[in-house]
Image: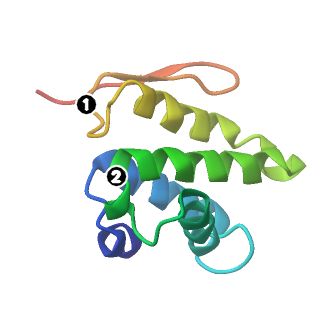
Amino acid sequence: MEHASGLGLATALSQAVLYGTIIQHGEEGKTSLTDLIARTHRALGVGSPVEVGEEGWLRQFVAQRYAVLDGTDVEHESRGQVEQFRELLDHGNLYLQGPITTVPTVTGYTVYTLP
């Protein structure tokens, strides 16, 4: 959450994406959270999400993470999570309003929000 805050990312989806990334990839090193942040900045030619908007920056970050996952056999199975994040972005669900239906490799799940 420190990274999200430091980058000025405020939406629930941005926080979920960064949280999932640091859990799987770690904070430092090749293909880590900080490396993916740097790759995203380079790809967009910016130094901060503020320069392109949170949604645009997040879309590029998700693309960078997907590319990293696509390059390995071990992490290949985690692409479903990134695809779910991309789908939420495509539907403009930056605040994770439910219900959200996930489609993992074997079965789907639906997450409901409380009224």
Residue at figure coordinates x 58%, y 71% from the top left:
38
Dot 2 or dot 1: first in sequence order is 2
Q: Which residue is mark 1?
A: 97
At label 2, which amino acid type do we have? Answer: Glu
The x and y percentages for residue 58 are: 45, 50
88 sits to left or right of 107: left
The x and y percentages for residue 110 are: 41, 21
The x and y percentages for residue 36 are: 61, 65
Q: Nearer the viewer, residue 67 or 47?
A: 47
Residue at figure coordinates x 29%, y 25% from the top left:
112
Q: Which mark is residue 54?
A: 2
Q: Which mark is residue 35?
A: none
Above or below: residue 61 compared with residue 80: below
Residue at figure coordinates x 31%, y 62% from the top left:
50
Q: Residues within 10 Å of mark 2 (few under 14, many from 20)?
A: some
Quadrant in which the C terminus is drawn: top left
Above or below: residue 32 compared with residue 83: below
Q: Secondary structure at mark 1?
A: loop
At label 1, which amino acid type do we have? Answer: Gln
Quadrant in which the N terminus is drawn: bottom left
The residue furthest right is: 73
Q: CA distance from mark 2 to mark 1?
A: 17 Å
